[in-house]
Image (tube, helix red, strand yellow):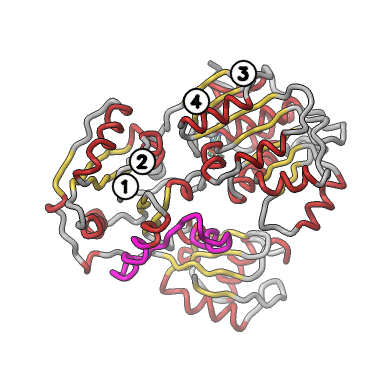
Amino acid sequence: MSELFSDYNLRPELISAIARAGYTAPRPVQQASMPAILAGRDVLAQAQTGSGKTLAFAVGCLQQLNFNKNAMQAIVLCPTRELAEQVAEQCRVLAKDMPNAKVLTLCGGQPMGPQINSLRHGCHIIVGTPGRVMDHVQKKRITLKHLKVRVFDEADRMLDMGFTDDLAVIFAGLRGPVQTLFFSATFTEATTALAQAYLRDPESIKVDSEQRANVSELVYTVEDGQRFNALKALLTTEQPNSAMVFCRTKRTTQEVADMLAQEGFVVAAIQGDMEQVDRNRVLMRFASDCLNVLVATDVAARGLDIAGVDCVVNYEVSENPDAHIHRIGRAGRAQQPGMAFTLMSESEGAALAAIEIHTKQDLKKKGAQSLRFHANRIIEPEFVCLNLNEGKKAKLRPGDILGALTKDADVPGEDIGKIKVQANESFVAVKRRSVKRALKLFREGKIKGKRVRAFKL
Ligand code: AMP
């Protein structure tokens, strides 16, 4: 296996872009999949978000396409807009030294006009969500005549979201073989069937989550009806700055988040019924340390680009061992070991046993009655997230926001946390003690000569 990107015989423009992005050595998933990808073979990979799989398939596409020909040659399909945008961004970073390469994002929930326009101008790589890509294919705005590579990213989640038929429609008109790269965090019967429908003699690879060894796991046995009490007691005992709580259903997810909020926790839910803008806001708050607890379903959490959390709590035992591994893979921040707790009632014994067999370990168990809830030990996040109503389209950059806050509003630099500028809005995390001053700036002052409205999330 190659220890260096330069061993792969890549285009020099790719080697330079990889080095500039700061990637020194290929990750295990890249080492395992890139030889087959670069040899033009189909690949079936079990890999988690955070493993580095995007770079593996992005390099595969960028290495093989002909950017002197104005024709769409690769399609990457992702379950959500967030993931599609992350993938497109990574492709663009890697294509920095290939000035002709055009990457186009086509996601649902976005206006059609600009997408139609961009398609008219042409592109080489499309990254999108299946529903919207299907629309364009059906209206003949996309032709698959020159397609060389197609990628199914987070295939299990596309399946969960009911995109199977859309995928079939997109590729119904395909003539001749193309290379297919299929990535999924978990493999169930349905995912395997989907893979079989699209792949030819694939090279199969499996990479365990690298963070796993670092996570210490403990199971709390709970009485039915005592689950929520155990959760809030656990959170005030461990006092994590960031915790993800996983539930099986959207309904429980929302209920648990609402009940925790009532107790005084700074918490939000993320589940499939939420509007995109609300999901985005919740994610921004969590990623910038403005929320201590995020309650999520497996489906909604998969694919989220969250660096890692102090603590994962399985509010209910996961029915699928792979999903369990995926959940606890989130624990651990910046090389710090993470903690993962599972609340298990008697009726969940079989599901836990399946996880223990799958992961070849006996998990330590303790009675949840040893846990005590301490209302005065609920911690507050250090930062508050401010949402600004302007973004990249108004030529706003992170430096402008930082400059205005530190120079015009006298907010100490150490009181400003993460700043994220998106197309039409921005987010800035500000320490509690400086929130008033920051809001006053947005109420009364200007940034780059423009009035920018802000509100607390
Ligand atoms: P992914 O699993 O594709 O979502 O990637 C997770 C993260 O790993 C991304 O933020 C990448 O920037 C980063 N990454 C990918 N490949 C490498 C590498 N070889 N070395 C260091 N970081 C990487």
Tag nearer the camera, 3 or 1? 1
Measure how far apart labels 1 and 4 are at the Cα level. Answer: 27 Å
Residue positioned 80% across, 36% down in the render: 72
Q: Work out whether mark 2 precedes mark 1 in sequence or the reverse, and give the earlier one.
A: 1
Give the side of residue 45 with respect to residue 109, left or right. Answer: left
Check disc 3 and give the amino acid type: Ala
Is residue 447 depicted above or below 201 in this figure?
below
Q: Work out whether mark 3 precedes mark 1 in sequence or the reverse, and give the earlier one.
A: 3
Residue hosting label 1: 314
Name the secondary structure under disc 2.
Answer: helix
Q: Are marks 2 and 4 in contact (CB under 8 Å)?
A: no
Q: Work out whether mark 1 precedes mark 4 in sequence or the reverse, and give the earlier one.
A: 4
Measure how far apart labels 3 and 1 are at the Cα level. Answer: 36 Å
Tag nearer the camera, 2 or 1? 1
In this orientation, which residue lies closer to the viewer: 38 or 430?
Answer: 38
Name the secondary structure under disc 3.
Answer: helix
Residue 7 appears in the picture as rendered: no
Residue 239, image quadrant: bottom left
Q: Are marks 2 and 1 in contact (CB under 8 Å)?
A: yes
Residue hosting label 2: 328
In this orientation, which residue lies closer to the viewer: 31 or 362?
Answer: 362
Q: Which mark is residue 36?
A: 3
Residue hosting label 4: 28
Name the secondary structure under disc 4.
Answer: helix
